[in-house]
Amino acid sequence: MTVSAHSVLKSVFGFPEFRPGQIQIVERLLEGKHTLCVMPTGAGKSLCYQVPALMRDHPSIIISPLVALMDDQVAGLVANGVAAVAIHSGRSREENVAAWRAFQSGEAKLLYLSPERLMTPRMLDALKSVEPGLFVVDEAHCISKWGASFRREYEQLSQLKHHFPNATLAAFTATADSATRADITEKLFNGEGETIVRGFDRPNLNLSVTPKLQWKSQILEFLAERREQSGIVYCLSRKLTGEVVDLLKAEGYRALPYHAGMSPEMRRENQEVFMAEDAVVMVATIAFGMGIDKPDIRYVFHLNMPGSMEAYYQEIGRAGRDGAPADAMLLYGMGDAGLRRRFIDGDGEDEGHKRREHQRLDALLAYCEATQCRRITLLSYFGEPGAKACGNCDICLDPPVLLDGTREAQMLFSAILRTGQSFGSGHVVDVLRGGDTDKVRARGHDALPTYGIGKDRPKAFWQGLIRQAVAGGYLKSDIDQFGVLKLTDRGDAVLRGRETFELREIVIGKGERKPRRTRASKAGESDVDSGLLAALKNLRRELAAERNVPAYVIFSDATLIDMCHLRPENLEQMAAVNGVGPKKLADLGEVFLAALRAQT
């Protein structure tokens, strides 16, 4: 089985080896086992289902949320000689009919569909006649109300196991905490599938957070050393998106807007420019990003706080997909946090959902106020404790000044313990500050020794301390139990005097901390002929424009860099370049060989 999978990997996609973790997923799907795969962005999840889809006897259905993403995936497969088709509203009826006939006849083994199109009675009945063997749910976090990107049309996918009981179900996502993972497996597999977590660590990302002070000067300072790089600037509103585009254009940047208020044609045009060209700044709301597979995005700059750790992780994951260093900068303002809370409170009537979203926002605030390595905080949130300091985030490279907060932490931890570790931060702070509330009186917490011992500190101080304690692993905020605060072993050690608690100064109101200037280098490109690489990229851009596909469908940056290193002189040598499979060798080999010869 392994040899056969490796043979498909090499003969179709042009890669000599699987990346770590890929072959285990491929083997599970070939064995017919339902599987949820959580893999960091850029880890190569597409190959994990494309390889077994080509090896299985029965056809496969890939469920994808976006038309553009489906088209790009199909174009990439066709470029590698794989017969794949998509059916969606962006194609004509004739094109969709032709795609269905190719799939029904067995000419194409992979069919890409949106969840809305798949779950219609007509499509479900039609698919039963071809007996699909594998269903792959991409961006699977969208199926869960516990997740940060729930989409109602995805919820219907929970019926797949009833319609196709003999098919293997696979789900892939880069963003899912433990509660979201459990919900996905319950809905798709009745809890019977296996979950494989390949980790959330993206060591090539430099993580930085700084207070939002003068955002215009802050973004211009950040971009000053990045004029030749492509990146994304995320904004909370359409209005701010326009302001930022105007600011950057006035400073000579090629900045393009992207938000839901634009026409689909204009959004598509701007996305194509961003995907195909260098040194473009995409200024966007969260409407932009899902399915974006541009490998050389060198930075993601958040002008406003995202709504949760999941959203933040998903958005920064669009940077550095080529494995080279990239920067993630977040401007942190409590005004943004207040606005996010108002969004949550106005989001429908599901109180449980609102509580979970508030807790997710609290986790992001804790990340912003972290006193230790940001990667440790991030990985701990996603259930990967024990990570070592990365040496590559703003805190590791420019540690904050810490104060002894042991006494205050002991007061907080004592209040949590004495109230039975059964309450969230709001009630605990009320007890500490001597709040006269119905909840405090009804439970007799106004008679506790800790009642009112923290009244000399404002509410914002205690909230900040709680966020730091959660970020540092002293407390656990249990999302499954509505944000109940519980002491960890480390928190218990502080309470009992066996360990001290270092406190990052909590500034009530505006404070300033000079951000360290960072810059992602173009790792991998430093030791290649820059003129040759530029020539190959220009050729790639021209070919992509001719074929109306994203540039990476022609060849990835990694493949072009490998060409520069190997400098093949004939087709046999070109076949040894990483990412050059037989179909691309036949279609593109001579064209790129000519470009290489012209530069020698």
Image: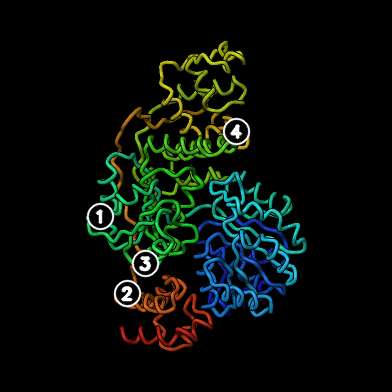
Upstream in the sequence, badge 3 or badge 4? 3
Compute the Cα span from label 4 to label 2.
53 Å
Compute the Cα span from label 3 to label 2.
17 Å
Residue sitting at x 42%, y 57%? 319
User: Residue 269's image quarter?
Assistant: bottom left
Mark 4: which secondary structure? loop
Query: Badge 4 local density, few (<14 within 10 Å), some, or many (20+)?
Result: some
Query: Do residues under tags 1 and 3 come within 8 Å of each other at their CB atoms?
Result: no
Upstream in the sequence, badge 4 or badge 1? 1
Compute the Cα span from label 1 to label 2.
22 Å
Query: Do residues under tags 4 and 1 come within 8 Å of each other at their CB atoms?
Result: no
Q: Which residue is mark 2?
A: 534
Q: Which residue is mark 4?
A: 482
Query: Residue 140: where, in percent of width, then height?
Result: 60, 55
- Mark 1 or 3: in front is 3
User: Residue 56's image quarter?
Assistant: bottom right
Amino acid found under the numbered disc labelled 4: Phe
Query: Residue 318: where, in percent of width, then height?
Result: 45, 57
Mark 1: which secondary structure? loop
Query: Residue 221: where, in percent of width, then height?
Result: 26, 50
Q: Which residue is mark 3?
A: 273
Residue at the far front: name it: 93
